Amino acid sequence: MAPPPPPLAASTPLLHGEFGSYPARGPRFALTLTSQALHIQRLRPKPEARPRGGLVPLAEVSGCCTLRSRSPSDSAAYFCIYTYPRGRRGSRRRTTRTFRTDGAATYEENRAEAQRWATALTCLLRGLPLPGDGEITPDLLPRPPRLLLLVNPFGGRGLAWQWCKNYVLPMISEAGLSFNLIQTERQNHARELVQGLSLSEWDGIVTVSGDGLLHEVLNGLLDRPDWKEAVKMPVGVLPCGSGNALAGAVNQHGGFEPALGLDLLLNCSLLLCRGGGHPLDLLSVTLASGSRCFSFLSVAWGFVSDVDIQSERFRALGSARFTLGTVLGLATLHTYRGRLSYLPATVEPASPTPAHSLPRAKSELTLTPDPAPPMAHSPLHRSVSDLPLPLPQPALASPGSPEPLPILSLNGGGPELAGDWGGAGDAPLSPDPLLSSPPGSPKAGLHSPVAEGAPVIPPSSGLPPPTPDARVAASTCGLPDHLLPPLGTPLPPDWVTLEGDFVLMLAISPSHLGADMVAAPHARFDDGLVHLCWVRSGISRAALLRLFLAMERGSQFSLGCPQLGYAAARAFRLEPLTPRGVLTVDGEQVEYGPLQAQMHPGLGTLLTGPPGCPGREP
């Protein structure tokens, strides 16, 4: 067996060719495809010395397709790419670029060339290898990944469903992904759904909400009898909630600049379209009653958990609820007496040494993620079902064109679609079925319309009857916590114990505790560490506020705050010695009392897209 070809340099041309434009009387272009970008140079009528939009980074491309004219006399084929470049103000805006493949005399030859380009671009987007000297045909593409989308329609002040329809579904359809979509109706609905799914039918489960919905999904997978296999199911998050902490970490991992709101959603959707997973550490948390749940984000006590739960009444404000909650929390700052014990990590995480001899690793504060959706007032009982969305057919009209343009249709005889998806002047194009489904694979059906009525659940799901709602349901997973002695028993001698009065204690796994709150600046999804941060009593309100503000840049450890402490650990035990308080796990309130937790490295899989260069966006 021949060894695989060496990796190509980012500037090595993979394909090069000359294309016309749409409409045909427009300029002609030379296209060059590399592993990182599509280079576009105008040839005629006059070459551009400095072409605008002449470089399209693949990080901004969601997908591509080939089209044909409905005019029988047009022998050209058309190659279209969907891009989301950043504008002058930093926000992304959807655009399409359509090129005319007309170098051959027959439509069949032009179509084969257009499909060669679309196939090569799709392989690069999905991280699939291209043959060194072999022919590039749609046979190289596997069947499209099939995703289960779970949408909390109450997320993001009720914008989650609208954003999903207007942005997420078009983008993943442009990428050639297939999906089923279900709107959750109550707390723990997602947990019940994934407990009964036939997981072999899916390639990933993606939540469209805040962090609370993903908490339900992961705990539902670990509650299954086949949890060892179920927890390997890749999970993803598209941020439409208040906190969106994990999405902030995914955004950073992908090399994008920090973003909030719709920009963060578009960044994470672009990464999802690219595919690619990453091991995800999960924290097993044992509560005072002996029940257990699993965390992908944080355990908080004190100021952070107080602000998170008390700001629930301001949920209508979206992420601004945390800002208001912080101001109110600072006005009534409390301290809590407690005992924190931890098993130190054997390897110190690599990071630059902060100033003032402060601890060097993942850190601390921040307002917590979006709690689970409200349990009442759920008028939506909808399910959108299956595979490529019947997206509207674009008119592809050129502004100022004096004559009607020929209508383009999908290669392969796709359905004729009409209407406007509501994009930025261009309705999206559906992916070519020949590119999305290789020969021999079953063809995708059309989505059923969104309809009112009872939620649609596949007959094979075997869901158990609904259980009463609870803030955080206990896990029945059989995964042992081999580093933890039973709660209430002495700890091993290699543990470290701190006792005193605290303003807050935070145990966090990823880098972010909010979309714009970098609590652990150099944390990784799979570093195997839980990052403990605490703030002791004696800190002034002004100093605590400075810590929060510095966390937006991840620079809180360089402030030299003497009350700020940090440790990297593999397990910890927290024993509140104050009779009243609030404890949260992934932003969800749990029973108050002693708890302990152990990190399980790489137990889950997170859909992150390809890694980027932090701080350097294309």
Image (spheres, rainbow, N blue to C red):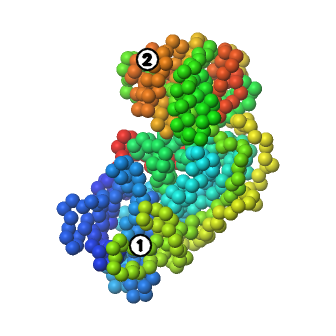
Task: Give residue 561's quadrant in the image.
Answer: top left
Residues under labels 2 and 1: Cα distance?
Answer: 58 Å
Q: Nearer the viewer, mark 2 or mark 1?
A: 1
Write down the residue under mark 1. 396
Structural crowding at the residue carrying mark 1, measured as other residues with C-alpha within 10 Å and reported as few (<14), some (14–19) or many (≥20): some
In this image, 533 relative to 153: left or right? left
Task: Give residue 303's quadrant in the image.
Answer: top right
In this image, 545 relative to 233: left or right? left
Residue 212 in the image: state x and y as whole percent: 62, 40
Write down the residue under mark 2. 561
Residue 584 in the image: state x and y as whole percent: 63, 30
Give the residue displayed 43% in from the left and 61% down from the top: 424
Residue 495 seen in render: no
Give the residue displayed 57% in from the left and 50% down from the top: 159
Q: How many marks?
A: 2
Depth order, front residue of 523/318 = 318
* Helix, strand or loop status at disc 1: loop
Depth order, front residue of 213/130 = 213
Depth order, front residue of 155/184 = 155
Q: Earlier in the sequence, mark 2 or mark 1?
A: 1
Residue flagged by tag 2: what amino acid is it?
Answer: Cys
| Disc number placed over residue 356 in the picture, else none | none
Residue flagged by tag 1: what amino acid is it?
Answer: Leu
Asked if residue 241 is positioned above or below residue 457 in the image, the reply reads above
Find the residue positioned furthest to the right. 465
For the residues labelled 2 and 1, say whether their Cβ atoms are less than 8 Å apart.
Answer: no
* Helix, strand or loop status at disc 2: loop
Give the residue displayed 58% in from the left and 13% down from the top: 501
Asked if residue 287 is positioned above or below residue 70 in the image, the reply reads above
Structural crowding at the residue carrying mark 2, measured as other residues with C-alpha within 10 Å and reported as few (<14), some (14–19) or many (≥20): some
